[in-house]
């Protein structure tokens, strides 16, 4: 099986489960906004969850895999089975100790943490609910960290389906606790003054994190993991993982770091109430695209690149990267334009229910406009990172990440001071998108200087055809918006029908123009869809 086919097959099964997770994630967020709207309580809940959830994004969506997979793959190829699993057990229990300390300290110092995040706010007293909720939810950092270690082990063994499916359980747990029959009795455990649906949702988050780890344990045991207690900060393998993990927390998580920076600026006294929630909801819509495909491909290419790097086969490594950029851009460029053109109908159809009204839709659509503009760059960063991590280089991404973070902070300040009247609550989103482009191009040119040409001309030629097809699609969507103007102000089912028709027309135009232009990505995707993947590994089975 060629590397290209292996990546697509693995990404297919990861994407399938991730899509299911994103759908459940939408349902989860829709339930949260229905209960809380874009109120002050909603902002407190989102802010409180944003902090431990940041650890999930750092560890669960790349950093742990980036640090662990190359080292564990080396053990699999060069050490015996006993040494390999002894190393895995030491990593697991050492990570458990470190994460436990973080969870305890996070809960104890929640007040100080929230104070830092709301330093630009009008009054600290309005964030008391956030402090309480953050204390409840911080242990989630431990649970999701252990789940990330389990996922990294299974991914190293080319088992992608089960780890990708665990987030579905997390979302279902929160959804369960958003139901009145559950959250009304559960929230009574909270102190008087904090007995809100948000308190019960926090408990649902803890249960969901527990499930994400527990369901992977049987498969780990089946493969050879015995969970024998063993903590070591001196083991050479553990030290190598730690050395890779530390810098990669910054490098691979720059988008999420920038999201936290955005949250801090969104609490500014100049921002309208609900800005924190609006940014969160817009970000969640973005992740429906980013998580379903870009992260799936990034997850699938790391083991392939690690093997190529270990064999010093840099020509194939460059081909793998160029292919990944092309195939992901074929999805993210039209998705970005589609989100920008259809931002308001999308937010209205997905979230305008209960306490989330028309004003909340406008607030969120504005943030989505500027977030969507950076979608191709954000996806590109997630693809370039594995090229560095496969070579066990995490220092270079840190330099790029630090520069991008500085760009984001400076732009946030400038936009808030000078362009707030025009950009409103979209200022943090635009700053993040521009910082992502800076991060991507800096990493791309550094990598090209190190390993030589990355096939930039061929990639640019391919992206040019995708851009033309995407522009045609955007024009069609804009025309449909005007043609079906009456439906957007009608009942929700009319909006759903109009949005469905508009998206279908846009996709048809995009595929048709891409076909006429000879975009090879269409044939590559059709080829993989003809294969029947194995649910456990993502590998194809004979038809």
Image: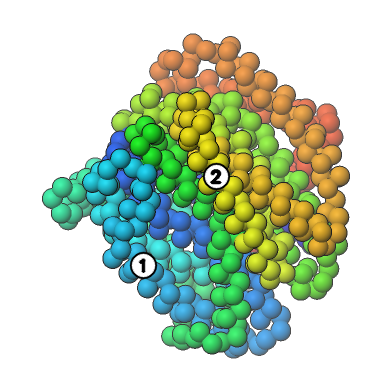
- Outermost residue to the left: 192
Q: Earlier in the sequence, mark 2 or mark 1?
A: 1
Q: Where is the N terminus found, in terms of image quarters?
A: bottom right
Q: Residues within 10 Å of mark 1 (few under 14, many from 20)?
A: many
Q: Where's residue 284, x and y in %?
A: 48, 42
Q: Residue at x 65, y 76 (%)?
A: 71
Name the residue that disc number 1 marks.
103
Q: Nearer the viewer, residue 364 or 284?
A: 364
Q: Where's residue 322, x and y in %?
A: 79, 52
Please say which color scheme the image uses.
rainbow
User: Left or right of 230: which side holds 12?
Assistant: right
Q: Residue at x 57, y 51 (%)?
A: 406
As displayed, is residue 485 above or below residue 69? Answer: above
Labels in figure, total: 2
Q: Where's residue 517, x and y in %?
A: 84, 31
As displayed, is residue 6 above or below residue 68? Answer: above
Q: Where is the C terminus found, in terms of image quarters?
A: bottom right
As displayed, is residue 60 above or below residue 293? Answer: below
Circle 1: element type: helix
Name the residue that disc number 2 marks.
410
């Amino acid at each position: 099986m060629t590397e290209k086919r292996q990546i697509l097959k693995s990404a297919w099964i990861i994407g399938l489960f991730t899509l299911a997770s994103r759908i459940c994630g939408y349902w989860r967020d829709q339930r949260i906004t229905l209960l809380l709207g874009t109120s002050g309580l909603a902002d407190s809940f989102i802010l409180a969850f944003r902090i431990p959830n940041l650890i999930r994004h750092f560890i669960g969506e790349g950093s742990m895999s980036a640090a662990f997979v190359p080292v564990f793959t080396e053990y699999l190829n060069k050490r015996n089975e006993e040494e390999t699993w002894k190393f895995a057990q030491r990593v697991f229990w050492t990570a458990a100790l470190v994460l436990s300390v973080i969870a305890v300290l996070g809960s104890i110092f929640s007040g100080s943490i929230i104070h830092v995040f709301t330093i630009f706010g009008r009054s600290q007293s309005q964030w008391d609910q956030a402090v309480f909720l953050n204390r409840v939810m911080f242990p989630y950092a431990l649970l999701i960290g252990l789940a990330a270690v389990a996922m990294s082990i299974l991914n190293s063994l080319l088992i992608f389906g089960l780890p990708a499916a665990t987030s579905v359980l997390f979302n279902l747990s929160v959804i369960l606790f958003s139901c009145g029959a559950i959250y009304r009795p559960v929230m009574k455990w909270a102190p008087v003054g904090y007995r809100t649906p948000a308190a019960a949702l926090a408990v649902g988050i803890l249960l969901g994190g527990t499930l994400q780890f527990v369901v992977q344990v049987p498969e780990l045991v089946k493969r050879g993991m015995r969970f024998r207690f063993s903590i070591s900060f001196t083991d050479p393998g553990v030290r190598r993982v730690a050395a890779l993990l530390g810098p990669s927390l910054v490098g691979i998580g720059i988008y999420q770091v920038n999201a936290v920076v955005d949250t801090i600026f969104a609490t500014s006294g100049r921002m309208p109430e609900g800005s924190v929630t609006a940014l969160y909801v817009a970000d969640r819509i973005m992740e429906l695209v980013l998580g379903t495909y870009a992260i799936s491909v990034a997850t699938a290419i790391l083991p392939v690149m690690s093997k190529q790097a270990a064999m010093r086969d840099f020509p194939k490594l460059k081909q793998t990267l160029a292919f990944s950029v092309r195939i992901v851009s074929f999805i993210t460029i039209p998705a970005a334009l589609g989100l920008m053109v259809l931002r308001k109908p999308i937010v209205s159809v997905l979230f305008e229910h209960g306490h989330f009204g028309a004003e909340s839709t406008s607030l969120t659509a504005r943030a989505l406009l500027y977030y969507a503009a950076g979608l191709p760059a954000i996806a590109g960063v997630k693809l370039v990172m594995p090229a560095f991590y496969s070579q066990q280089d995490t220092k270079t991404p840190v330099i790029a990440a630090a520069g991008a973070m500085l760009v984001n902070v400076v732009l946030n300040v400038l936009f808030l001071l000078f362009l707030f009247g025009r950009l409103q609550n979209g200022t943090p989103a635009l700053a993040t998108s521009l910082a992502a482009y800076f991060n991507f191009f800096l990493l791309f040119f550094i990598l090209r200087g190190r390993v030589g040409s990355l096939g930039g001309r061929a990639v640019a030629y391919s992206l040019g055809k995708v851009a033309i097809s995407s522009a045609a699609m955007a024009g069609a969507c804009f025309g449909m918006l005007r043609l079906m103007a009456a439906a957007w102000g009608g009942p929700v089912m009319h909006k759903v029908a109009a949005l469905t028709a508009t998206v279908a027309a846009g996709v048809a135009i995009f595929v048709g123009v891409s076909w006429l232009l000879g975009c090879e990505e269409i044939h590559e995707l059709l080829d993989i869809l003809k294969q029947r993947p194995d649910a456990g590994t993502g590998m194809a089975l004979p038809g």
